[in-house]
Amino acid sequence: MDKVHEQKYEFCRHELLVLVQAIDKQILRLEYEVDENEQETVYIVWLQSYGEYRKPINVTADSLAAMARDVLKYI
């Protein structure tokens, strides 16, 4: 993972997670992944009665602010 991806990973796991959990208490975690084609995805993981539900959000080439906006659209 390069420096930009590391920064996005940390932002997703800390600052952005605190924000989305303040809005929706059912959110367990956010997962940031980069695939072999450099596609970046944030998964919002909710706790449901049947288990976990993961919603993928494409955040490829997003700045941190754009990533936050894209994730907030789904909650």
Image: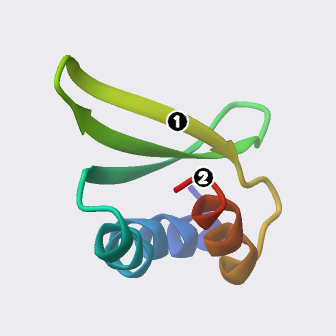
- Please state which amino acid type lies under the numbered disc 2: Tyr
Note whether 46 is above or below 4 in the view shown: above
- Secondary structure state at the residue bearing disc 1: strand
Q: Are marks 2 and 1 in contact (CB under 8 Å)?
A: yes
Q: Is residue 68 left or right of residue 17?
A: right
Discs 2/1, front: 2
Q: What is the quadrant of residue 62 in the picture?
A: bottom right
| Left or right, residue 68 beside residue 52 | right
Q: Nearer the viewer, residue 61 or 53?
A: 53
Q: Nearer the viewer, residue 53 or 33?
A: 53
Question: Quarter holding the N terminus?
Answer: bottom right
The residue singled out by tag 1 in the image is 55
* Residue drawn at 59 percent across, 66 percent down: 72
Amino acid residing under circle 1 = Lys
Above/below status of 58 relative to 20? above
User: What residue is pinned by disc 2?
Assistant: 74
Residue 34, quarter of the rendered image: top right
Q: Position of residue 30 (x, y in %)?
A: 39, 53
Q: Does residue 27 sit above or below 36 in this rendering?
A: below
Q: Position of residue 60 (x, y in %)?
A: 78, 53
Measured along the vertical axis of the image, is residue 36 above or below residue 21? above
Q: Nearer the viewer, residue 14 or 19?
A: 19
